[in-house]
Image: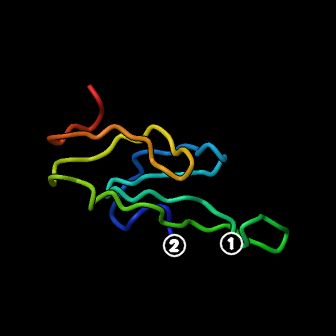
Amino acid sequence: VSAISPGSTMTWAGFSNDYSLMVMDSDGMLSMLASETGINTSGGGWEWSPMLDTVGLRKSNDDSFWPVTCMDGKLVCVPLKGGNEHPD
């Protein structure tokens, strides 16, 4: 599993409040880098896990989200309307 959906680009990278690396791609998929074992040990590896597909949260095809952070398992973001790429 890749952090980025096929054919998309990375639009945001940041850390959650528990220091997990999070990325969002231009398709609106939020993914997290997680240890395969839950706790990284010398025998475990790391993999990207999809966490949230924001496409279903859009009210129109032109809407998107500007991520700020992930806090306690929730995406904190600014909704963008009408094809805007960043908040005004």
Q: Which residue occupies 21% across, 37% down?
A: 84
Of marks 2 and 1, the one in the foreground: 1
Asked which quadrant contains residue 29, the reply is bottom left
The location of residue 28, given as percent across then percent down, is: 34, 55
The numbered disc on residue 36 is: 1
Looking at the image, residue 57 lies above or below residue 2: above
Q: Which residue occupies 49% across, 59% down?
A: 31
Asked which quadrant contains residue 54, the reply is bottom left
Is residue 67 rendered to the left or right of residue 79? right
Q: Which residue occupies 16% across, 48% down?
A: 62
Label 2, secondary structure: give it: loop
Q: Quadrant of the C terminus?
A: top left
Asked which quadrant contains residue 79, the reply is top left
The location of residue 27, given as percent across then percent down, is: 31, 58
The location of residue 3, given as percent across then percent down, is: 49, 62
Q: CA distance from mark 2 to mark 1?
A: 12 Å
The amino acid type of the residue labelled 2 equals Val
Question: Relative to the observer, which residue lies in front, 35 or 79?
Answer: 79
Is residue 32 rendered to the left or right of residue 52? right
Label 1, secondary structure: give it: loop
Residue furthest to the top: 88
The numbered disc on residue 1 is: 2
Is residue 48 rendered to the left or right of residue 18? left
Colouring: rainbow
Name the N-terminal-most of marks 2 and 1. Answer: 2
Is residue 88 rendered to the left or right of residue 70? left
Question: Relative to the observer, which residue lies in front, 64 or 25?
Answer: 64
Q: Residues within 10 Å of mark 2 (few under 14, many from 20)?
A: few
Q: Which residue occupies 25% across, 39% down?
A: 80
The location of residue 14, given as percent across then percent down, is: 54, 43
The amino acid type of the residue labelled 1 equals Glu
Q: Residues within 10 Å of mark 1 (few under 14, many from 20)?
A: some
